[in-house]
C-alpha cells in the first residue's frame, strides 16, 4: 500500500522537491525516488535517494515492527510474496480505502451543497461507494480472520 504524505504542497506536492528535506530536484541535481503519494490528487511524491529515502524506509520498518508488537504478532505473521495480496495497493484493502476517501469527500460536499441535482448525484455516489465499501470490508475481514481461540482463552 502506498504511503500518503499529508500537508505537502508547492514543489513537494508536485514531485519537484524532497518531501523530507525540501531539496529541489531541479536546482540541487540530486537523485530522487518515489516514496509515496499526495492524497490531494494521488500524484507521486519523491525523496532524495540518500539519505532521505533510506531514513523513510527505516522509519516505516520501525513503525511496522512497533505495530506488530502492539498487536501481539511476530515475524511469522508477516505476509510474504506467497500470501493473499489483500493488502496490496490494488487489493481489496486499497480499494476499501479509496471508497472510504470518496465517502468522506462526498460527506463534505453534501454539507455545503444546496442544489437538488448535485445533492441527488452525491447521494447516488454515496450509496454506490457505501455498498462497495461494505462488501470489501466484509471480504477483508473474512480473509484476515482472527485465529481460533480455545474455550476459556477469552
Image (spheres, rainbow, N blue to C red):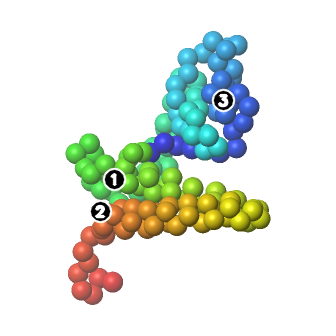
**Position in image of residue 3 (x %, y %):** 52, 43
Q: Which residue is mark 3?
A: 14
Pointer 2 residue:
143
For residue 75, say whether it is visible: no
Residue at (55% x, 17% y) in the render: 31
Q: Residue at x 49, y 36 (%)?
A: 57
Tag count: 3
Kindly report the distance in space between the C-alpha atoms of the residues bearing marks 3 and 2.
36 Å
Q: Assign a secondary structure to mark 3.
A: helix
The picture places residue 140, in percent across and down from the top left corner, at 36, 62
Depth order, front residue of 26/110: 110
Visible in this render: residue 76?
A: yes
Q: Which mark sits nearer the N-terminus, 2 or 1?
A: 1
Q: From the viewer's perspective, is 27 left or right of 137?
A: right
Is mark 3 in CB contact (under 8 Å) with mark 1? no
* In front of the other: 68 or 136: 136
Amino acid at each position: 500500500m502506498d504511503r500518503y504524505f499529508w500537508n505537502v504542497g508547492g514543489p513537494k506536492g508536485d514531485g519537484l522537491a524532497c518531501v523530507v528535506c525540501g531539496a529541489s530536484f531541479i536546482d540541487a541535481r540530486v537523485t530522487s525516488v518515489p516514496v509515496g503519494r499526495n492524497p490531494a490528487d494521488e500524484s507521486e511524491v519523491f525523496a532524495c535517494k540518500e539519505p532521505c529515502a533510506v531514513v523513510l524506509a527505516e522509519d516505516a520498518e520501525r513503525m511496522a515492527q512497533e505495530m506488530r508488537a502492539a498487536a501481539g504478532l511476530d515475524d511469522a505473521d508477516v505476509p510474504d510474496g506467497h500470501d493473499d495480496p489483500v493488502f496490496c495497493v490494488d487489493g481489496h484493502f486499497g480499494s476499501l480505502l479509496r471508497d472510504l476517501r470518496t465517502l468522506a469527500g462526498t460527506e463534505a460536499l453534501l454539507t455545503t451543497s444546496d442544489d437538488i441535482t448535485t445533492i441527488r448525484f452525491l447521494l447516488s455516489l454515496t450509496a454506490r461507494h457505501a455498498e462497495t465499501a461494505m462488501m470489501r470490508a466484509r471480504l477483508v475481514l473474512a480473509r484476515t480472520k482472527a485465529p481460533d481461540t480455545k474455550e476459556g482463552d477469552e
